Image: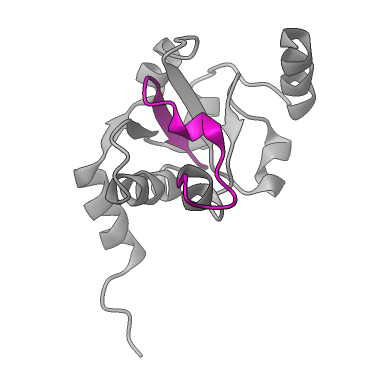
Amino acid sequence: MPITKGYQQLVAEAMAQVTTYSVEEVRARLHDPQVQIVDIRDIRELAQGTLPGAYHASRGMLEFWVDPASPYHKPLFADESRQFILFCGAGWRSALAAKSLQDMGMQNVAHMDGGYGDWVKAGAPTETLEEQKAQREKKH
């Protein structure tokens, strides 16, 4: 069975329909309390580090965590006062994920173009999972 619409077309269509921020735009909003950065990469990719304050929601569970009717729902995603900015490794998965969440009715979602790869290339701040855990423990 031939593929009639490849990943490049899917990503291009998603990018045309979702709000896309550059690394610089996300970096400027990193500490904005109205923004929640969401790392949708696979758990194995997190060993490289993540964005400071990012919430990890793997791509495979994202729709289930967002939907209040799901037994896996995470209340964080019900906060309509926040904008959720998704990122992945290169910006492809996050574009597809943001479109999927928009299709579900979520309007306060966007994604970061270039993903973690471009974030690191830009010299933007990162943190390890251990540093992130220590920050969360300080708050509680």
Tell me the quarter of the image containing the C terminus: top right
Q: Is residue 108 above or below residue 98?
A: above
- The residue sitting at the left extreme is 16
Q: Is residue 19 magenta?
A: no
Residue at 56% in and 52% down: 61
- The residue sitting at the bottom extreme is 1
Most foreground residue, 121 or 112? 112
Q: Position of residue 21 (x, y in %)?
A: 32, 27
Q: How is the image coloured?
A: one colour
Q: Is residue 37 left or right of residue 9?
A: right
Q: Position of residue 6 (x, y in %)?
A: 32, 69
Tell me the quarter of the image containing the N terminus: bottom left
Q: Is residue 109 left or right of residue 16?
A: right
Residue at 53% in and 30% down: 76
Most foreground residue, 73 or 34? 73
Q: Position of residue 86 (x, y in %)?
A: 44, 35
Residue at 32% in and 86% down: 2
Instruction: Please state the total of marks drawn on the protein image.
Output: 0
Q: Is residue 37 above or below residue 64?
A: above
Q: Position of residue 133 (x, y in %)?
A: 76, 22
Q: Is residue 109 above or below residue 135?
A: below
Query: What span is in magenta?
Result: 67-88
Residue at 80% in and 24% down: 130
